[in-house]
Amino acid sequence: MRFVIIGAGRVGLRTARVLRDEGHEVTLIERDDGMIRRARNEAFSVVEGDGSQETVIEEAGIANADVLGALTGDLNVNFTACMIAKHHGCRTVMRIDEAYREGIYRKYADEVDEVIYPERLGALGAKNALLGGTIRAIADVAPHLQVLELTITDQAPVNGYAMGELQLPADATVLAFGKQDRTLGIPSEDESLEVGDRLVVLADFDVLSEVRQLLVGETASRALVGADASGDSGGVN
């Protein structure tokens, strides 16, 4: 897949590294000289300029991109970039600062494909949002513990099971359950697991791959490890 990422600060650059490591093509947009040098030193393609300007986004190849991730610390830049990308038919992921909380989330959630708080989720959480799909990091709660939301697929071995029949690894536990398009809550043993249902799981990094295989049906080449919960102190375009 081809990605355009606005912002080469901590969140943007770390997300770009994760995507590139998985074989995706990434172009960054940044206007800070130091961040541009750092990204280019890591052999990333960087377009210098304001990420809220359509000409700059077009120079970065938005016409042929699959996803735009607006990951700067500036909400106005991020929202403008997403609206431009929407006109080019791209999936859009917009970063908002955690301090904006639910009011801002509700304001913008209908305008973009996904809104994220990377200060909580780290680079892998941002990557999950950019890729979309059936698994997302919610929070790191300890050095080796992560909270994930997973969506049951038709390939999941547990599809059709009742909650009482679900057996996760010893170092993983279900925190919440939600039927497709319904609010998350505490599951009962009689709840059935069906395509589109969501499970929020607390798991040790060592068993993430096994949890993913059970609930999503995809054998991960590596677990979602090393999530970095550091904020992005710069990268504002």
Image (cartoon, rainbow, N blue to C red):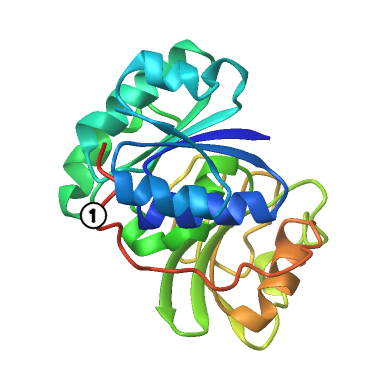
* Residue at (50, 81) in percent of width and height: 145
Specify the farthest residue to the bottom: 170
Above/below status of 130 relative to 211: above
Out of 152 and 210, give the one closest to the viewer. Answer: 210
Q: Which residue is mark 1?
A: 98
Image quadrant containing the C terminus: top left
Q: Whole-percent x and y of residue 184?
A: 44, 55
Q: Whole-percent x and y of residue 39?
A: 47, 50
Q: Whole-percent x and y of residue 75?
A: 22, 37
* Residue at (70, 53) in percent of width and height: 22
Please give left or right for residue 94 compared with residue 177 in the image.
left
Out of 195 and 2, give the one closest to the viewer. Answer: 2
Image quadrant containing the N terminus: top right
The image quadrant that residue 162 belongs to is: bottom right
* Residue at (47, 44) in percent of width and height: 182
Q: Whole-percent x and y of residue 61?
A: 55, 21
Please give left or right for residue 70 compared with residue 144 in the image.
left
Please give left or right for residue 29 compared with residue 78 in the image.
right
Residue count near mark 1 (Cα–Cα under 10 Å), binned few <14, some 14–19, many ≥20:
some
Image mark count: 1
The image quadrant that residue 207 belongs to is: bottom right
* Residue at (62, 70) in percent of width and height: 189
Out of 162 and 45, give the one closest to the viewer. Answer: 45
The image quadrant that residue 74 belongs to is: top left
